[in-house]
Image: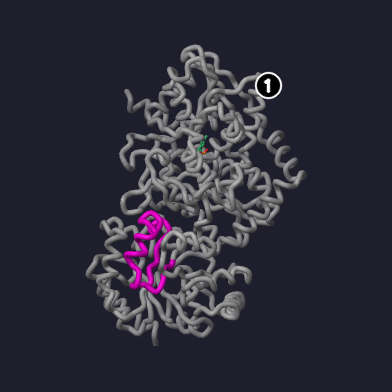
Amino acid sequence: MKGIYLAGGYPDTNTFRDCFHAVATSGFDFIEVGIPFNDPIADGPVIARAIHDSLGNGVTPDQVMNEIHSLRNSNIKKYVMTYANIIYSYGIKKFSDRLTGLLNGIIIPDLPNRMAHLFHENGLDIPIVPFATLETRESDLVMMNRSGSEIVYFIGVRGITGAQSNFESPELVHKIRMIKENTDKKVVIGFGIKTGEDARQALKIGDGFVVGTEAVRRQRDPEALRDYLRSLCQ
Amino acid sequence: MRSNNGFYGEYGGQFVPEILIPALDELERAYQEFRNNDESVTEFDRYLSEYAGRPTPVYCAKNISKKYGFHLYLKREDLLHTGAHKINNTIGQALLARFMKKSRVIAETGAGQHGVATATAAALFGLNCRIYMGSLDVERQMPNVKKMKLLGAEVVPVEEGLRTLKDAISASLKDWVTNVTDTHYLLGTVAGPHPFPEMVAYFHAVTGREAAAYFRGKGILPDCVVACVGGGSNAMGIFQGFLDQPDVALVGVEAGGRSLNPGDNAATLSRGTRGIFQGALSYLLQDDHCQVQDVHSVSAGLDYAGIGPQHSFLKDTGRVRYTHVNDGQALDAFHELTRLEGIIPALEPSHALAWTLNHSDELRGKHVLVNLSGRGDKDLGIIERHTREDR
Ligand SMILES: Cc1ncc(COP(=O)(O)O)c(C=O)c1O
């Protein structure tokens, strides 16, 4: 399960589409499209800056959703990553209706597992991807199994997007083993994957990875992104 | 004011990254143990009285009362150590941090009052301390920045966004996510994820208790209790003393800023809609595309797009009337209190005072209690600038 995060509509519609196709044709299994929110509390400076610039260019949640519609025929699995307020204030049911059938799941960095039911009870029909972290306790894992998502998003760092994971750390290896033993989900490691070496390491201990910051850094230049994607898959 | 599993009606909750959940659970356990343990409550009370200067007096402001035709009482939180109500909460949470064996505290600050109060408690209890402050607020509240540094805190100016309170809270959350093992986030108002709103309101409840006791001693009830509302902590503090007295009208005054146009004010409860922001579901100033609105107030402590979830609940139930006054009205009230009573208030409670003075007709003959949440030393630069501009 190899995945890439792209900031939706960044830096402009056409370049975003080129980047999307670069990911879809480079051997990746899924793509996460970010819908911008202007208080991105889980994002480091690179992604926060991209979000800020998109909003400055007038990108709206509706536009990014339109974009996802226009890319529906691409076979790659699609996820949306956005903050809780975007879905809540757009209207949970309305948001779900707009994207239902197009997505494999939604990643909401400020919606912890225990709050996810509120969104489902209020009309969200798309699976919410559960999180696991270095702080996850065994008792937290029960909740994860209730999610309809195929994957669990493992955040391998204490920090925000753009931090560096340490795949040698016994703590990390132990946590991933604990999750795999207690859930039926594929463990996708996010936050902190930068190089092909990181990606290989992640695939050794988990079932997949997502790269965000290093992809967004190259989103202004689809060719550079393509070269980088190749380096991740070697 | 107790929550129902972290919610007040539909408001509240825990909308933060998953990695913080174990820390919030630990904090909740510590807080519950604390409030059920006589020894910790006694220790807290002792610091409040011997260190912070509680109880604070209620002063019947004779000159203003005479001029405006009502009885004005001021709850003198401005007399507390560090100059504002914020110290109640920082001593409480510093005791909890010590109990949880956290060696480091971080905090956001707008006006700098919460930053100073946090740095003070950190010095007192030997905790490492870092304060996040929007760089615009660093400029406009410089005396407090200097105090925090003297007290041994590291002050980190935040350059993101509008460089005010929202951005300082975001930066604090990012720090907490990164350093959650050894760090307690000493949040300064009744906002954020559960248990912060309930816990911060608990630490401030002493204000309302003292005020209620004063009026019991006089054998009357106030007709009206007025407080300014930024995130909502001083207001929750004083309202809790009167919530169960239906004859006491409660009024929360937000910052009307320059105008009621989007971006020009911080009147969240009057102009906002429901949203999820910085940990809680509550009212929020946001635009048509679900983005947090820019805000403005002459007062750095009220300059916030969000609001504590209890206030959203109290608005919807109708128990509290929420309203706003603009920058100019707050500045006028500041001068009025200074000249007529010899008390220099902070610009935040000047909003509560302004509403009261502007409603003298409605309040004629009544007993009105205003929570004077802090003193104005920190605001002298702003006052000077505005006086110059007026000339
Ligand atoms: C004196 C004073 N009053 C009020 C406030 C506003 O905060 P809250 O609404 O949490 O009481 C502040 C915040 O800095 C303050 O310094």
Q: Is residue A82 magenta?
A: yes
Q: Is residue B151 positioned above or below A91 on the image?
A: above
Taking the image as drawn, is residue B33 in sight? yes
Taking the image as drawn, is residue A169 in sight? no
Report how many numbered discs are placed on residues in the image: 1
Residue B117: x %, y % from top left? 59, 41
Residue A134: x %, y % from top left? 57, 70
Query: What residue is shown at x 34% (from left), y 72% (from top)?
Result: A101
| Residue furthest to the bottom | A234
Q: Is residue B222 positioned above or below A15 on the image?
A: above
Q: Dot 1 lies on which element?
A: helix
A197 or A56, which is in the foreground?
Answer: A56
Disc 1: which chain? B
B372 or A184, which is in the foreground?
Answer: A184
B386 or B225, which is in the foreground?
Answer: B225
| Residue furthest to the top | B66
Horizontal side, residue A156 vs residue B182: left or right: left
Figure colour scheme: one colour
Horizontal side, residue B292 vs residue B152: left or right: left
Q: Residues within 10 Å of mark 1 (few under 14, many from 20)?
A: few
Residue B10: x %, y % from top left? 50, 50
Disc 1: which residue? B217
- Quadrant assignment for the N terminus of chain A: bottom left
Q: Is residue B260 positioned above or below A25 on the image?
A: above
Which stretch appears magenta? A79-107
Query: What residue is shown at x 44% (from left), y 48% (from top)?
Result: B166
Q: Which residue type carries mark 1?
A: Gly
Residue A29: x %, y % from top left? 38, 81
Q: Is residue A161 magenta?
A: no
